[in-house]
Amino acid sequence: MDIDLPEVVAEVEAAFARYEQALVTNDTETLGALFHVDPRTIRYGIGENLYGHAEIQAYRKARPAVDLMRRLEGTVITAYGRDMAVASTLFYRASAAGKVGRQMQTWVRFDHGWRIVAASVSVIDA
């Protein structure tokens, strides 16, 4: 298996950047489009466990659009072959001094593009 083919990593980096921009601007349509539409898609959040695209999208549309800006650090994207990758990053928010957020996403290439099939977000003391 080829790991970290440059063209694949570049594609996932672009999808990840699109996700981050949508997240901090509360673009719920783009966020929804980047998650695989399937009841097996999972997102474990800081205070919620979401099973299936419908639950994830309902959460996105209902959450308050405040305190969304954040700074990323230590982002690592690893591609396994041509159709699967993992994106991991740390994030910091000005309103959460002394805390560090952690985010991991599993991305899969489908015929219609790269989509998140599993995600997890947590916050710990810095």
Image: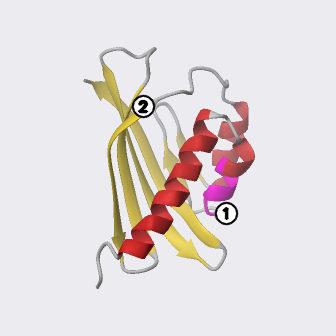
Q: Residue at x 43, y 46 (%)?
A: 120
In the displayed structure image, the side of residue 122 where residue 25 appears, left or right: right
Q: Residues within 10 Å of mark 1 (few under 14, many from 20)?
A: some
- Residue range in magenta is 31-37
Read off the residue under disc 2: 71
Whether the magenta-drawn stretch holds residue 2 is answered as no
For marks 1 and 2, the one nearer the N-term is: 1
Q: How many marks?
A: 2
Question: Which label was assigned to residue 20?
Answer: none
Horizontal and vertical percent position of residue 50: 56, 46
- Tell me the kind of residue under disc 2: Arg
In the displayed structure image, the side of residue 104 where residue 118 appears, left or right: right
Q: How is the image coloured?
A: secondary structure
Mark 1 or 2, closer to the camera = 2
- Tell me the kind of residue under disc 1: Val
* Residue 18 appears in the figure: yes
Q: Residue at x 43, y 80 (%)?
A: 82
Q: Residue at x 61, y 63 (%)?
A: 36
Q: Residue at x 53, y 27 (%)?
A: 69
Residue 102, relative to residue 36: is it above or below?
above
Secondary-structure class at tag 2: strand
Horizontal and vertical percent position of residue 67: 56, 21
Read off the residue under disc 1: 37
